[in-house]
Image: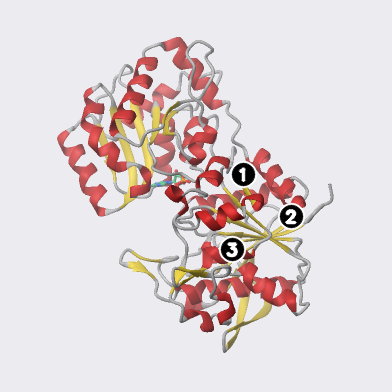
Amino acid sequence: MTSLKIALISPEVFPFAKTGGLADVAGALPKYLVRHGQEVIVIMPKYWAIDGEKFGLSDTGIAITVELGKETSQHRLFVSDHIPGVKTYFVEAPDYFDREQLYGTPNGDYPDNSLRFGFFAKSALAVLEALGFEADVLHCNDWQTGLVPVYLKEQAVNGGFLSNAKTLFTIHNIAYQGLFDRDELPKLGLGWEYFVMEGLEFWEKVSFMKGGIVFSDAVSTVSRKYSEEIQTPEFGYGLETILASRRAFLHGIPNGIDPEKWDPTTDDRLAARFSPSDIGPKEECKRALAEENGLTYSPDVPIIGMITRLAAQKGLDILSRCFEELVGLGINFVILGTGDDEYHRIFEGFKEKLSGKVGVNIMFDAAMAQRIYAGSDMFLMPSRYEPCGLGQLISMRYGTIPIVRRTGGLSDTVSEFEPRAMTGTGFLFSEYTAGALTETVKRALNLYKDETRWKKLVQNAMTYDSSWDRSSAEYIDLFHKILGK
Ligand code: ADP
């Protein structure tokens, strides 16, 4: 296959700036596309919080000119070689990006997000032109890049640069859509002809995500199951009809994880290292985790780990309804997460009431996350919906058995353990109820008592192939398909 020129455009990229799984994808996928022989560059905003020194950002000396509505402005362009084989470009715009957070404060989104990301979309095209990078495919990600295909179409009509380029729009979470007042449209330099049902209009608002869906050559999301789910009213957040009408252009490609980053055989943040053929030292990690969280350690009492945004999406309402019952079954919990105050209070309350059995850490801490992935026996994700989910993939790598709801990427990547055939990697439940969750945890607990089968289950999970190698090959196939090659 011929090598393609790909420009990945994303509002966040690990390790430069991250709020969620999108950053992990945008940081890892390009590296693997390059390993598969593609030429890839990445474009993102130059946020104030990016550590320029640590990541070796330098000024390219190229000035880019961006026209947005009536405004024309000039901007510096920075570059970093931190991701091997990939040039990451950063658009400087202090008025828009020199802020404490990426999208907003705990009190709400920044009020000018439409202009911030309208500008970013427009600037990405200007960057490609200034670099003379004739991309075959512009790979756009989430609502913040939804106007890229719109501006590209406008530009192509006039036979401009990139008039042969195609676009892929990837939805990482359809619940966040970038909805703005209609009056923003002229400021974004877009005519009222776009404010129609077949365009950007969504219930009298301007929808950036709809722009991405309608104007791209193909749409993808981060698991096959989620690509089906978002065509239904339960999961589509109002976009199900438009997605169903574009079904032929809608694809599901699961996210991978970076096997070099998540590796229990070399991870020096752990109390001990272990592998599928030498699982024993994992117990050391469990003992250390229990101690760190003030839990009474016993090899017979499993620890369930959870690392999550404390948001309604993550199934915390059903969990809080059966939490005390689960602990009563002889299970300890370690939770790491930040998010809604309501859940902070609920889980802090459980910690107090169930002391010695529950550890609750309200913070974002990557090193602690690694210790929980390694030291827990099971990993719980009772999500209401989950586009892909990374937690279950990482936990499997560390031999920690996922207990998940059968939705989105959880359903695609975890398979039920069959005690007779000894196949499968975890435990699943379908109904979104505390009862179904409890039953499934009981099933896991029963198997935990069967040492031989549990060991096989751990080995199955640890050897599950969640690497980007496979998924990046699927992206390359899709790029070729979009290009009609
Ligand atoms: P989402 O993108 O919906 O938040 P994912 O499961 O796709 O969920 O990705 C979450 C990622 O963020 C995982 O890598 C997880 O380990 C990490 N993470 C979430 N919360 C925390 C936290 N409090 N501390 C450290 N890492 C976290």
Task: Identify residue type, mark 1.
Answer: Ile
Residue 421 locus on image (x, y percent) = 54, 12
The residue that label 1 is drawn on is 253
Camera-nearest residue between 434 and 85: 434
The residue that label 2 is drawn on is 482
Camera-nearest residue between 429 and 60: 429
Camera-nearest residue between 139 and 283: 139
Task: Identify residue type, mark 3.
Answer: Gly
**Distance between the alpha carbons at the discs numbered 1 and 2:** 15 Å
Which numbered disc covers residue 212? 3
Residue 271 locus on image (x, y percent) = 42, 30
Q: Earlier in the sequence, mark 1 or mark 2?
A: 1
Q: Secondary structure at mark 2?
A: helix
**Mark 1 residue's CB less than 8 Å from ligand 1:** no
Task: Identify residue type, mark 2.
Answer: Ile
Horizontal relation, residue 458 to residue 331: left or right: right
Q: Vertical placement of 338 versus 300: above or below?
A: below
